[in-house]
Image: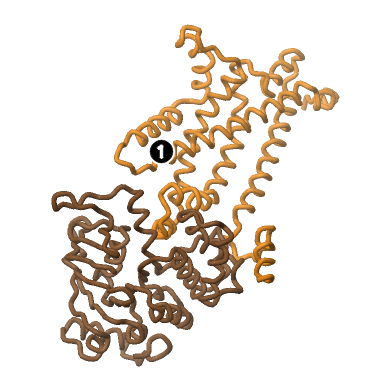
Amino acid sequence: MNFDTHFFWQYLFDSGFVHGALVTIVLAVLAQFFGIVLGLIAALMRLSRGPLPILRVIAWVYIWLFRGTPLLVQLAFVYFALPQMTGNAVSLGEFPSALIAFSLNEGAYMAEIVRAGITSVDSGQTEAAHSLGMSGWLTMRRVVLPQAVRFIIPPTGNEFISMLKNTSLAYYVSLQEIFFNTNQLASATYKFFEPFTIVSLYYLAMTTVATFFQSRMERHFERGFSRVVQQPGAMRRAVLAGLHRG
Amino acid sequence: MVELQDIHKRFGQLEVLKGISLTVDKGKTIVIIGPSGSGKSTLLRCVNHLEKIDSGRIYVDGELIGYREADGKLRELPARAVTRQRAEIGMVFQRFNLFPHMTTVQNVMEAPIHVKHVPRKEALEKARDLLARVGLEDKVTNYPSQLSGGQQQRVAIARALAMDPKVMMFDEATSALDPELVGEVLRVMEELAHSGMTMLVVTHEMGFAKEAADEVLFMDAGVVCERGTPEDVFDSPQQDRTRAFLGALREPSGLDQSGPGRAL
């Protein structure tokens, strides 16, 4: 094995990797966040049962377009094609282009994940809420969505791990995320094994941390759905205190 | 208080309500019995417009539910109006349908706070009182998953009562409960009936009907077969179908079924 261990240790914490990782993480977190917001909106639009189908149609077309074309193509569109489309009126830098393309793409997948989560909530919940005089939106906000979150977290965790890795596609538009920097280093030093090993370790570290956070979130939203006896939180301690006083 | 006039309802080709009419006067308790598939639950769900009707009229406290009249035809009301009407009609479901991500007291407070905009402190007080009334004052901070079925159903009753409904409907409220838990829920329902609540109850519990019902309706295949006082219907049924149903209920396996909640 032709592995230059000295090179490995020399570059392991090189600023190219550290800064690149920062860009990767920031891009992934922001894109995932916007993707979740877009996905939530699109899912609610798809599920709307109002008389006009316009909301359902718009949502469906959006999901179809952005799940049906490659992320790389979408990225190229935003970075290269948009200036041409708008006669150079709109020309975005590497990071904004990547953020927009990744967010739009993620939103389409999140829409289906959110929709699946919402429809997984027992219909009896909606009936009970309606029978108490709660409106559709109030029911969604207070009863359905909080319960849907349990179903949404695991697939979303998957999505975020994919997102962390998909950011490497942004090298195509010369965004200085970690993979782009790795390629620069390899080209400059003619060493490939070591840089790619290092970047793999960085990706592994990032995705492992993401997995850990997913577990934390799953456990938080488990509350009320398992038979584990909870320690009273601040609000419940206040209620109990009120009871004993009264 | 509740008036149903000639209600017809179809699910696709299947007509499940073939012209049901009934009246529930204020403070009275009407019990509906009948075999499964007879349309009893559907009827209840039409009253608070969880199901649409094909023809007929439903009135609660004089107000037409779910629709408005336009040249003798029914035009469905917008969602906001239906929502407001539903706030006055309480419903207790067979499978409780408590909100599992909220504690019992939060379950009971939820609708008063967010629908009637009752101040939180007041809603909390009232919720505690209602939970005490159903015998659960010590379960205030528990989640539904930590309660037995009978306790959950009692919370569901408290939750429905929190909205001060004009009428309470019970859709087989004890059918999903273990036999030894049925009694505690029936006691709450009996107390409610005797305290003057207008109630429409679908149940198989004949003991409850004898104890609390002012009128009993027997439904079969979408029509009201027989109606009268509990004594009329249980002790001297006029129709063959009624007799057959009561017979099957009393001795489903040929064995004597007397016991708590099932005493005849």
Provide residue B185's location: percent of width, then percent of height: 45, 78
Looking at the rendered image, the quarter that the C terminus of chain A falls into is: bottom right
Provide residue B91's location: percent of width, then percent of height: 38, 66
Q: Does B192 appear above or below A220?
A: below
Residue at image x 61%, y 27%? A167
Query: Image quarter for residue B54?
Result: bottom left
> What residue occupies the far top of the structure in this picture?
A87
Query: Image quarter for residue A161?
Result: top right
Q: Does B110 appear above or below B188?
A: above
Query: Image quarter for residue A48?
Result: top left
> What residue occupies the far left of the structure in this picture?
B71
**SS state under label 1:** helix
Residue with the mark numbered 1: A45
What's the colour of chain B in the image?
A: brown
User: In screen coordinates, is A59 left or right of A89?
Assistant: left
Few, some or many residues within 10 Å of mark 1 (<14, 14–19, 20+): many
Q: Does B263 appear above or below A244?
A: below
What's the colour of chain A in the image?
A: orange
Could you say which is closer to the camera, residue B113 or residue A138? B113
User: In screen coordinates, is B66 left or right of A121?
Assistant: left
Residue at image x 58%, y 34%? A32
Please state the chain letter of the residue tagged with numbered disc 1 in the rendered image. A
Provide residue B1's location: percent of width, then percent of height: 29, 69
